[in-house]
Image (cartoon, rainbow, N blue to C red):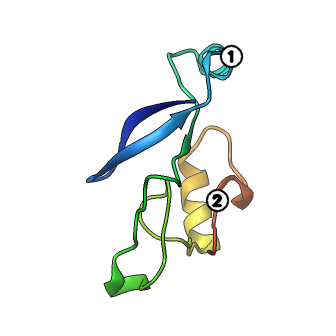
Amino acid sequence: MTAILFSVWEWSGSALDEGDEASKWFTNYLGKPSRLVCFNEESETRHVDPNYASGFRVMFSDGYPFLVVSQESLDSLNERLQEPVPINRFRPKFT
């Protein structure tokens, strides 16, 4: 796998490119140039702000290892979308 540079918010690091076959599939499916990458756990560490969740690490998520959402928030989002999405479209993760 080839390492490539990426950034999430103000953090930058390397990810591992999953190759041309995956890239072609996602490019065709999404209709724009795309690459599939995985977090490079061997060389990268992305810690969560200790003021909010001390001792946790994240990979590609916004910045925290968990997601808190209410039904009201989901309903509000779905009112703005052409096709509503279920809550399982989001990826809460506890590490």
Task: Reply above or below: 25 against 63.
Answer: above
Task: Reply above or below: 5 against 94.
Answer: above
Task: Reply above or below: 85 against 37.
Answer: below
Residue marked by disc 1: 21
Kindly report the distance in space between the C-alpha atoms of the residues bearing marks 1 and 2: 25 Å
Give the percent coordinates (x, y) of residue 14: 41, 42
Q: Which residue is at 70% across, 61% downward?
A: 87
In which quadrant of the rendered image does the N terminus lie?
Answer: top right
Residue marked by disc 2: 91
Give the percent coordinates (x, y) of residue 3: 46, 33
Q: Which residue is at 69% across, 49% downward?
A: 85
Is residue 86 shown left or right of residue 82? right
Asked which quadrant contains residue 71, the reply is: bottom right
Asked which quadrant contains residue 75, the reply is: bottom right
Q: Amino acid at mark 1?
A: Glu
Q: At numbered mark 1, what does the secondary structure look like: helix, strand or loop?
A: helix
Q: How crowded is the residue under tag 2: few (<14 C-alpha within 10 Å), some, or many (20+)?
A: few
Q: Nearer the viewer, residue 22 or 83?
A: 22
Q: Which residue is at 68% across, 47% downward?
A: 84
Label tally: 2
Q: Amino acid at mark 2?
A: Arg
Give the percent coordinates (x, y) of residue 40: 51, 48
